[in-house]
Image (cartoon, grey):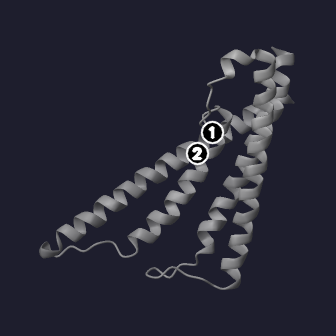
Amino acid sequence: MYSTISGFLTRLSRLLAMLGGALLLAITALVVLSVSGRALIWAGLAPIPGDFELVEAGTALAVFCFLPWCQLERGHVSVDVFADRLGPRLNAALAVLFDLAMTAVAGFILWRLWAGMQDKMQYNETTYILQFPVWWGYAACVPVGAVFVAACAWSAVRDVMEPRTG
């Protein structure tokens, strides 16, 4: 069961990270096209309407897509000034503690993301130019945020199990 959950979360997180990368490439292309349109107005081109709204929503989703993979790969920033002096057992305990703290933070972010989505839905808030509902961006991030919470919780389990399984 341990390897099944680990494999599933790893594959899902990797897939989400690739989706985030593809989103960033698409955002980059959008910005290049829009800026080119602004620069070439004299030639009959135009900027893409609502480009900044699309960049904003896409970037938020891309960031959320990267978080689970970063957590599973232990890629978050850490300060290891004293870690070398503490020894392997204390470092392992600290890793579990930090993973539990990250799980709590990820859970809080997911909770507030859900609450924000509910708020945007209730007030029917839309973007200024494209007029698409703002809650769509939140709704796209909620399931990815749930995967982030799962990855954080699994990291804590993994850090407890690794010393036992070698």
Residue nearer the viewer, 128 or 131: 128
In screen coordinates, is 144 left or right of 126?
Answer: right
> 104 above or below 34?
above
Residue nearer the viewer, 97 or 117: 97
- Tell me the residue at 49%/46% (across/down): 21
Q: Label 1 crowding class (10 Å Cα cut-off): few <14, some 14-19, many 20+?
A: many
Say what amino acid the circle numbered 1 marks: Trp
Give the mark count.
2
Residue nearer the viewer, 93 or 117: 93
- Tell me the residue at 29%/59% (across/down): 32
Relative image position of residue 134 (x, y in whole percent): 58, 75
What's the mark number on residue 156? none
- Tell me the residue at 66%/23% (across/down): 82
Relative image position of residue 22 (x, y in whole percent): 47, 49
Say what amino acid the circle numbered 2 marks: Phe
Asked if the residue at tag 2 contacts the one at tag 1, i.e. Cβ–Cβ closer than 8 Å, the answer is yes
**Can the viewer see residue 150 in this picture?**
no
Q: Tag 2, which secondary structure? A: helix
Quadrant of the image containing the C terminus: top right
The answer to which quarter of the image holds residue 29 is bottom left
Q: Residue furthest left?
A: 42
Q: Residue furthest bottom?
A: 123
Relative image position of residue 111 (x, y in whole percent): 76, 62
**Can the viewer see residue 103 in this picture?**
yes
Relative image position of residue 153 (x, y in whole percent): 80, 41
Quadrant of the image containing the N terminus: top right
Residue under numbered circle 1? 69
Q: Label 2 crowding class (10 Å Cα cut-off): few <14, some 14-19, many 20+?
A: many
Q: Measure the C-alpha gap from mark 1 to mark 2.
A: 6 Å
